[in-house]
Amino acid sequence: MLIGHEKLTGTFKRLIQEDKLSHGYIFFGEPGVGKFSFAAGLAAYLETGKFQKLSRPLEEALIIRPNEEGTISINDIRESKYFLFQKPAHSPRRTVIVNDAEHLTPQAQHALLKIAEEPPASAFIMLVVSNSEALLPTLQSRLQKIYFPRVSSKLITAMLVKQFKITKEKAAEIT
């Protein structure tokens, strides 16, 4: 369940319906505010028509995360390039989500920059970062930045009460 970003959800749904979605975005903000969940939900919306938590792997989405050494290598980006250049079958776009993109090696960032400069028509790239300044300025300039603010304590408390049927006091304590 994704809470606190309903306005962004509506905006992105509208962009998709009006065919005005950019080829790529940088989702940034504090850790734990729902950036990756939003990106995954958006990929699901493109493929299934439902903005929801992933219940199964998507056919038209590739998720890249840091490896055991804590980096995202140029080979990961090369894999994403081959993935993006295939035509989508179940979605209007082939989606790559790079989670914790601040862990991209310099070489991987340069490789991603080349993709972002001349993306295939059906490509959709989402970089999820806490600090967008960790990315090369040239890469930042090729993708639209979307800030994810903290979700209010009030909203989290209300969700806990509704979802888990606990008292407001307990929910406030957890929040």
Image (tube, rainbow, N blue to C red):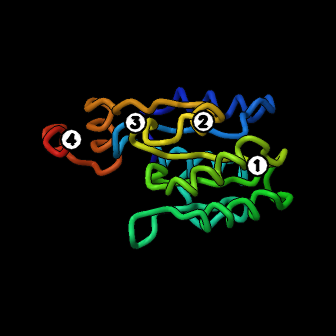
User: Residue 59: percent from the left, percent from the top?
Assistant: 72, 65
Residue 118's quadrant in the figure? top right
- For the residue carrying disc 2, how many other residues have a C-alpha within 10 Å: few (<14), some (14-19), or many (20+)? few
Q: Nearer the viewer, mark 4 or mark 1?
A: 1
Kind of element beneath mark 1: strand
Observer-nearest residue: 54 or 104? Answer: 104
- For the residue carrying disc 1, how many other residues have a C-alpha within 10 Å: few (<14), some (14-19), or many (20+)? many
The three-letter code of the residue at mark 4 reads Thr
Residue drawn at 34 percent across, 44 percent down: 31
- Determine the CA span between mark 2 and mark 4: 38 Å
Kind of element beneath mark 4: loop
- For the residue carrying disc 3, how many other residues have a C-alpha within 10 Å: few (<14), some (14-19), or many (20+)? some
**Which residue does the numbered mark 4 point to in the structure image?**
175
Residue drawn at 70 percent across, 29 percent down: 14
- Determine the CA span between mark 3 and mark 1: 24 Å
Q: Nearer the viewer, mark 3 or mark 2?
A: 2
Say if 152 sits above or below 52 in the image: above
Residue 27 in view in this figure: yes
Residue 89 in view in this figure: no
